[in-house]
Image (cartoon, rainbow, N blue to C red):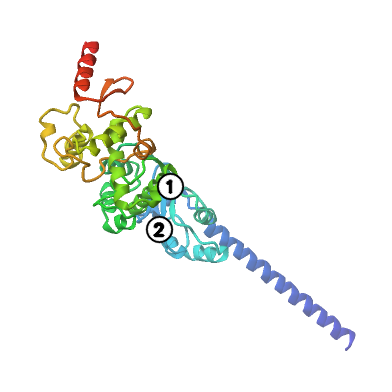
Amino acid sequence: MSIKKKKNLFLFIIKLFSLLVAFFLITVSVLIGFIIYFNSPLQEEILLAVSEEVEGIKKLDNGIYLIDIRRGESSQSAGRRLERAGLIKSRLFWNILCRWEKEHIKSGTYRLVTPSSQIAIHRLFVSGQEILHRVTIPEGVTLRKTAMILEEAGICTKEDFLSSARDPAIISNYGIPGASMEGYLFPDTYMFPAGYPASHAVRAMADNFFYRLENITPLALTMSPQEINEKVILASIVEREYRVGDEAPLMAGVFLNRLRINMALQSCATVEYIITEIQGKPHPKVIYNHDLEIRNPYNTYLRAGLPPGPISSPGAVALRAVFFPEKTDFFYFRLTDPSSGRHYFSRTHDEHIRAGLLITKNQS
């Protein structure tokens, strides 16, 4: 090959290389521009103009959004909702990003601060760092009051919770002999996301109950559902009666003594349950004699034995008291000091009456 031809070939290669480099640089520049453009967050004024009401996306104040990623939802579905709400510029870029990252988004409720880039939004969803709300269910509350607490916290609606707590499938799954989960949802502090499925909340609280019960006494694992239910019913009454922890086993002993001789339990707490939970009336400040005459299976003044079901959610103290009661010959107790919550325990009805007269005299 002549020198001229070699020179021409060399120049051709140089030009071709230059064209390839230029094409590569242009392609990379376009790609980078594409990424920067579509990844860049939308400004607040654009969000206000584009954003529309989209299911599972709620706008709060100061550019904050609550976004629900539903259980089993695909990244493509989430991208469509984000685009409709005006939170991302392009669903196409979102899908490319999700395929490139390969990490799946996780279900939950997320707090998104705008403006945020698509990469930042995607990282938030794959992190699983969802919003959790701290909800405390006090000891001794009823199913209805638990439902109200969860609704006020924005976890789930009262109706959904009560429906789930009365779902025969869930009740049967836990082997509970009754028509509801009353008494079997452990009072505790829970961390639930907003909009949590009510059935999940019920199961979480029931799982906690049986976990705590096993810790209190492994004996519970060998008991029949009916035997456990009787303990839970009694514990729910003790929960509503005791005020000082060390008196709970004494009260459990008193009630067991009464059950042993088929004596009426005579618990005002069961009458309160009838008034508030069955009749739907406000909580009474005082229980009158006519209240004690209410004809209802839960009235332990008129009916001997345990009521048909639990009347509250017993905590660890009440449950432990029923499984490990104080063995005494007491059959009665009455409140002696409202400020301290202490009770006087007696063996006979005459002693019980005398104690009442003495207490009244000392307080007058």
In terms of depth relative to the viewer, which is nearer, 101 or 52? Answer: 101
Q: Which mark is residue 288?
A: none
Occupied quadrant, residue 285? top left
The C terminus sits in image quarter: top left
Q: Amino acid at mark 1?
A: Pro
Q: Which mark is residue 70?
A: 2
> How many residues crowd mark 2 within 10 Å: few (<14), some (14–19), many (20+)?
some
The N terminus sits in image quarter: bottom right
Residue at horizontal 31%, vertical 56%?
Answer: 170
Residue at horizontal 40%, vertical 51%?
Answer: 221
Residue 307 image position (x, y, % from top left):
21, 42
Report if residue 196 is visible in the image: no
Q: Secondary structure at mark 2?
A: loop
Tag nearer the camera, 1 or 2: 1
Number of marks: 2
Q: Residue furthest right?
A: 3
| Mark 1 and mark 2 residues within 8 Å of each other at the beta carbon | no
Q: Residue furthest bottom?
A: 1
Q: Amino acid at mark 2?
A: Arg
In terms of depth relative to the viewer, which is nearer, 162 or 119? Answer: 162
> How many residues crowd mark 1 within 10 Å: few (<14), some (14–19), many (20+)?
few
Q: Secondary structure at mark 1?
A: helix
Residue 263 image position (x, y, % from top left):
19, 36
Report if residue 231 is visible in the image: yes
Above/below status of 293 relative to 166: above
Q: Which mark is residue 218?
A: 1
Is residue 344 shown left or right of residue 86?
left
Residue 319 image position (x, y, % from top left):
36, 39
Tag 2 or tag 1, which sits nearer the N-term? 2
Occupied quadrant, residue 154? top left
Is residue 122 shown left or right of residue 13?
left
